[in-house]
Each structure stands twice: as structure tokens, then as C-alpha cells.
Image: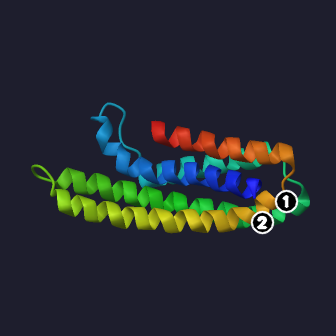
Amino acid sequence: MRKSLILQAAITLMVGGMLMGAADAGSRGDRSDRGELTANQIVAQSDARTARMKADLRLTPEQEKSWSGFQSALSEIGKKRADREISLRTKRAEQKGPGDFIESMRNDAVSFGERSEDEKKLADAAQPLYGSLDARQKERFSRELMNSDSERTQN
């Protein structure tokens, strides 16, 4: 039970930060001095973090069998996040004047629903891998997911 809660907390932090990055991007001021990342660059960053996580875990051949499902889920979520971020950026650029508060609430509700589905998919994909990890690997797995979350929220 405790392991399951730790996994859920780690995944929640990772996915929440990954997906909230798109919604949060516009609230941090003008980024024109740094340039905006393209969808491909966002996906490449996500893939690089995933590769670092795998290398850090030092998986056994048996554990490797469970990695591909988890990696696929992370990749899919990273692509969705990139698409949402680009879409949000485009909508903000096209917006003239203050936005419609009610429409914003509806958009947030859709986004939360999508993020919820992504989180469930990631938890389902991570469970077999997490169950096969030893205590050291579980600690690293959780730490890497949380570190990935903080990296995403800084971008």
C-alpha cells in the first residue's frame, strides 16, 4: 500500500508539472529574450529526461521488459504536452483584449480531464516496472520523476 502511494505521488508530481507547464507558460512574462521552444524541442527534452532516468536506474534484463511500456507512456504524454503548449501559445497570440473568464474555465476543465487521463495511463504503465525495482531503484525512480517535474516547471 505504501509503495503504491509513493508511486502515485511521484507520478502525480511528474505528470502535473509536465502538463501544467503548458498552462503556466504564459503567466511568467515575456519569453521573447529566450525564444520559445518548438514542439519537437519540447518532446526532445522529455525524451532526454526519460533516457537519463533509465540510465540512472541501471535496470536488469528482466526489468528492461517493463521499461518499454513506461517509456511509451512518457513519450505519448510528452507529445501531448508539447501540442497543448503550442496550441495555448497560439491562442494567446491571437487573443485580443481580456479573455472570456467562463470560456477559460471550460478550457481548464477540458485540460484537467486530459491530464487526469494521462496520469492514469502513466500510473498503469509504471506499475509493472515499479513493482520490479529494488529499494534503491524505487528511490531513484521517485526522485527522477520529481526532478523531471521541477525541470519542466522552470522552463
Residue bearing the label numbered 1:
132
Determine if residue 138 is in view: yes
Could you tell me which secondary element the residue under label 2 belongs to?
Answer: helix
Where residue 11 appears, as percent x and y from the top left, is 61, 54
| Marks 2 and 1 in Cβ contact (< 8 Å) | yes
> Which scheme is used to colour this image of the protein?
rainbow
Residue 61 percent across, percent down from the top left = 90, 59
Whether residue 89 sits left or right of residue 134 in the image: it is: left
Tag 2: Cα neighbours inside 10 Å, few (<14), some, or many (≥20)?
Answer: some
Q: Residue furthest top?
A: 33
Q: Residue at x 68, y 55 (%)?
A: 5
**Amino acid, disc 1:** Ser
What residue did someone put label 2 on?
A: 128
| Quarter of the image where one finds residue 37 | top left
Count of number-bearing discs: 2
Q: Residue at x 66, y 50 (%)?
A: 50
Left/right of residue 153 with respect to residue 29 in the rendered view: right
In the image, residue 8 sits, relative to residue 73, either above or below, namely: above
Quadrant the N terminus occupies: bottom right
In depth, the one of 50 and 32 nearer the eye is 50
- In the picture, measured across the screen, residue 53 lies left or right of residue 33, that is right
Q: Which residue occupies the extreme front position in the image?
A: 1
Identity, as a three-letter code, of the amino acid under mark 2: Pro
Please give the name of the residue rendered at 56% of the width and 48% of the height, measured from the top-left corner. Answer: 13
Nearer to us in this view, 143 or 33: 143
Q: Position of residue 124 (x, y in %)?
A: 66, 68
**SS at mark 1?**
helix
Left or right: 134 in relation to 99: right
At 78% from the left and 61% from the top, the residue drawn is 129
Residue 76 visible? The answer is no
